[in-house]
Image (spheres, rainbow, N blue to C red):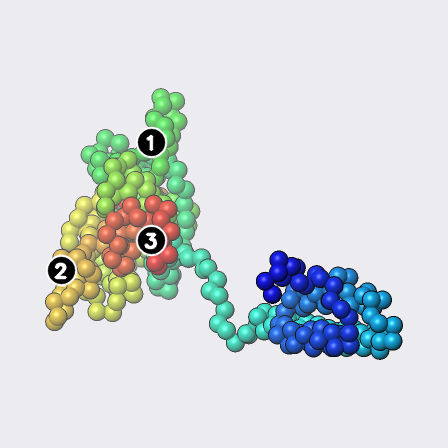
Amino acid sequence: MGSPDHFNQRVMVTPISTKRVEDVKSDALNTLLHISDLDSLDEWRVQYLGRKGQLTQLLRGLSSAPENDRAQIGAAANIAKTVLEEQLRLREADLKAEHLSGVVDRERIDVTLPGLPVPEGKLHPTTRMVREITTAFASMGFQIEEGPEIEYERYNFDMLNIPSDHPARDMWDTLWIDQARPDGYRPLLLRTHTSPMQARVMENIDPPVRVVVPGKCYRYEATDSTHEWHFYQVEGLAVGEGITFADLKGTLYEFARRIFGEDRKIRFRCDFFPFVEPGVDMSISNFKDKDGNRPINRDEDWIEILGAGMVHPKVLEGVGYDPDRYTGFAFGMGVERIAMLKYGIDDIRLFYSNNTQFISQF
Ligand code: DAH
């Protein structure tokens, strides 16, 4: 087979015979056995049955066969053609069915698989803390009130026994919205605490009063890990006949246990706030347990959490309550500070940094 025609052998006109027809047929059927996809099947069809296919070529060459053999060869070729076409149809049907069941397999839905987690929104830790604190007081009979963040100087200071010439004003670095004017216009500020709501509430209702007031406050202050220029407080006020310091202690003790746990002890020390007399600050216990661990991760036995006291007679008078008949206690706490202690957060600036990674931990 050294002739240069070797490579063209397939297109050479091969003498036609029944044997040749049979060869092409069995060759075709053999090849078909190995075909496993629809594309190859189509190639196979072109190769044997197509216009230039092997069998078609044979039939075309029928005229070159000896006249006596023609009928026989022609019949064989027609049978071969019918057989191949039939096999093609069957194989095609099989492959299509296989393909379909593959698709079904691949796309089958396993309803027993666990679902994909749906991203879940979270409440901001401040919101959660505000709700925890107010819920604790609500269950002790306190109502929840809210008040304006833009406040009159009168409520923020004067009615709380902090006149403008009093040095106690220095305790609150204030963001003023405008200044006093000679025409008696009352200047506005961003409230520095929630205490002004004490006066607003008492002006509006007669005793007995039991309210807690959560809300945002502002101070003209440089920020650091324990100071923000805006933050939340919860104010509390209880006024009625015969309310004593023992009521203050009992109420705040119960609150501390609910927020920080059953074993919590509390301690009061004298402190000064112009709107209470006596005034105190309250701390919660943080002693080491037998393994040397503290409930709150801070190297202190007592941790200050709020200011409180018995409502100053001048404040009661200012809102038209008779200080000889009514007494009461008030308290105020920083919400972020309580959340920091409870959740072990060491920088108050994290609360308002828009850091969703931080927020989503709670
Ligand atoms: N308003 C005070 C502050 O912002 C906190 C406070 C202290 C509130 C004593 C009170 C209180 O009601 O009795 O520093």
State the residue at coordinates (21%, 69%): 263
Question: Quadrant of the rendered structure where residue 176 is?
Answer: top left
Q: Which percent across, then down, holds residue 300?
A: 13, 57
- Distance of mark 2 from mark 3, alpha carbons? 28 Å
The residue under label 3 is 358
Q: Horizontally, is 167 left or right of 76 in the view?
A: left
Question: Quadrant of the rendered structure where residue 260 is?
Answer: bottom left
Quadrant of image for the C terminus: bottom left
Q: Nearer the N terminus, badge 3 or badge 1?
A: 1
Res. 301 mark: 2
Work out which residue is located at the far top of the displayed protein and give it.
182
State the residue at coordinates (37%, 56%): 360
On whether ligand 1 comes within 8 Å of the CB at mark 1, the answer is no
Look at label 3 and name its amino acid. Phe
Total count of labels: 3
On whether ligand 1 comes within 8 Å of the CB at mark 2, the answer is no
State the residue at coordinates (48%, 72%): 114
Is 234 or 39 nearer to us in this picture? Answer: 39
Nearer the observer: mark 2 or 3; the answer is: 3
Look at label 1 and name its amino acid. Trp
The residue under label 1 is 176
Mark 3: few, some, or many residues within 10 Å (few <14, many ≥20)? some
- Distance of mark 3 from mark 1, alpha carbons? 32 Å
Mark 2: few, some, or many residues within 10 Å (few <14, many ≥20)? few
